[in-house]
Amino acid sequence: MRVLRRRADRNALAELFERHAEDVWNHAYRLTGSWEQAEELTAQAFQAAGRRTAEAALLGDQALPWLLALTARLPRPAPSHDGDPAVLHVLTALATLPRSDREAAELCLLGELAPPRAAQALGTTEDHVRSAVDRARARLGQAEEE
């Protein structure tokens, strides 16, 4: 029975990877600004998802927001952005926000998730996500003035 369970988990993870690896990598790249760091972060995200395949399988169409939120919550080095100073500027400004605001802003502004999907992925309210994104935009505006 355990062998069948492990095989089903591997199959579920393979399907999850097949469907969402590119989107997770793109988000990881936006978060880090480095191809190499994006590869590492993507691998870590799917390793973490592999430990939680039952949860991921239950999410169905909501798996991508969950994966992006999981990716954003992983430890990562400071952004380096391989040659794009504007993106590095945005990442640096977002890094100054409190964690819950930063996660919401990263999912909506960088991950291009709608606030309801980001709220569900983060386990918070849509109002919180919208407020966090507003605060992030204000912070980005301040950073541009500096």
Image (spheres, rainbow, N blue to C red):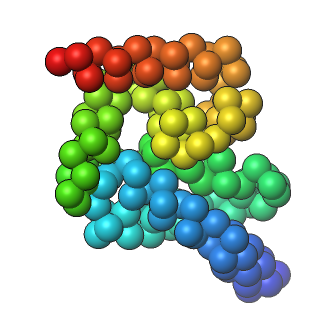
Figure disc tally: 0
Q: Is residue 6 visible?
A: no
Q: What residue sits 65% from the left and 24% below the top?
A: 124
* Rendering coords of residue 69 (x, y %): 56, 44
The relative height of residue 126 versus residue 30 in the rendered view (above or below) is above
Report the residue at 64% width, 48% height from top.
66
- Coordinates of residue 118 in the picture (x, y in percent): 65, 35
Q: Is residue 101 left or right of residue 17?
A: left
Residue 48 higher or lower than 144, as above or below: below
Question: Where residue 27 sits: x, y (%)?
Answer: 48, 54
Q: Is residue 84 left or right of residue 132?
A: left
Q: Is residue 128 left or right of residue 5?
A: left
Q: Where 9 sits versus 124, above or below?
A: below
Residue sitting at 64 percent across and 41 percent down? 113
Res. 144 image quadrant: top left
Q: Classify the position of the N terminus by image quarter.
A: bottom right
